[in-house]
Image (cartoon, rainbow, N blue to C red):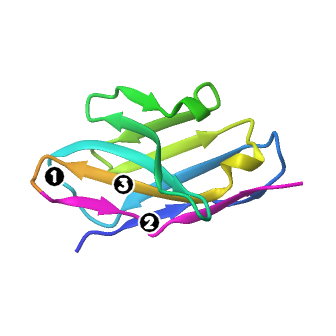
Amino acid sequence: QVQLVESGGGLVQPGGSLRLSCAASGIIFSIDNMGWYRQAPGKQRELVAQISSGGSPRYADSVKGRFTISGDNAKTTVHLQMNSLKPEDTAVYYCKINTFAYGRNYWGQGTQVTVSS
């Protein structure tokens, strides 16, 4: 069973930066896209950024211009560079890899990001 392992979360002051990384424990075939989601207390999980297998990124409006997603299908890794962090970015961040195989998608266990002074 392939697992996704996230790293890079932590506590940062407003205006600071963090880089999240996600790596698969094994090979994942037929990747459609890779992305990052987040869930704040009392809120629904939301898409933050996603990158297609062809390298096209898309972002939630709330993070455009501040976050950058990058990925490597061959290495099955995906990163999220987060700059100019705000308190409202505080959440548990999850990586997700979607494949073209029906129902075969993978979630990471989540990493906490806290933005506070």
Q: Check if mark 1's residue and mark 2's residue have beta carbons within 8 Å.
A: no
Tell me the quadrant of the picture where the N terminus can be found: bottom left
Label 3 CA crowd tier, 10 Å (few <14, some 14–19, many 20+)? many
Secondary element under disc 2, as helix, strand or loop, is strand
Label 1 CA crowd tier, 10 Å (few <14, some 14–19, many 20+)? some
Q: Position of residue 56 (x, y in %)?
A: 35, 26
Identify the residue shown where x is 45% and y is 70%: 109
User: Mark 1 highlights which residue?
Assistant: 29
**Count of numbered marks:** 3
Residue 24 within the segment the image draws in magenta: no
Measured Cα–Cα span from mark 1 to mark 3: 14 Å
Specify whether residue 76 is in view. yes
Residues shaded magenta: 103-117
Q: Horizontally, is 19 left or right of 10 in the view? A: left
Label 2 CA crowd tier, 10 Å (few <14, some 14–19, many 20+)? some
Specify whether residue 8 is in view. no
Judge by depth and name the residue closer to the eye, 117 or 25. Answer: 117
Identify the residue shown where x is 27% and y is 45%: 74
Which residue extends farthest bottom? Answer: 1
User: Mark 2 highlights which residue?
Assistant: 5
User: Mark 3 highlights which residue?
Assistant: 96
Nearer-N-terminus badge (1/2): 2
Where residue 116 sits, quadrant-wise, is: bottom right
Where residue 64 sits, quadrant-wise, is: top right
Q: Check if mark 1's residue and mark 3's residue have beta carbons within 8 Å.
A: no
Q: Horizontally, is 54 left or right of 11 in the view? A: left
Q: Check if mark 2's residue and mark 3's residue have beta carbons within 8 Å.
A: no
Judge by depth and name the residue closer to the eye, 71 or 94. Answer: 94
Type of amino acid under label 1: Phe
Judge by depth and name the residue closer to the eye, 24 or 91. Answer: 91
Depth check, mark 1 against mark 3: the one in front is: 3
Query: Is residue 67 placed above or below 19 in the rendered structure?
Result: above
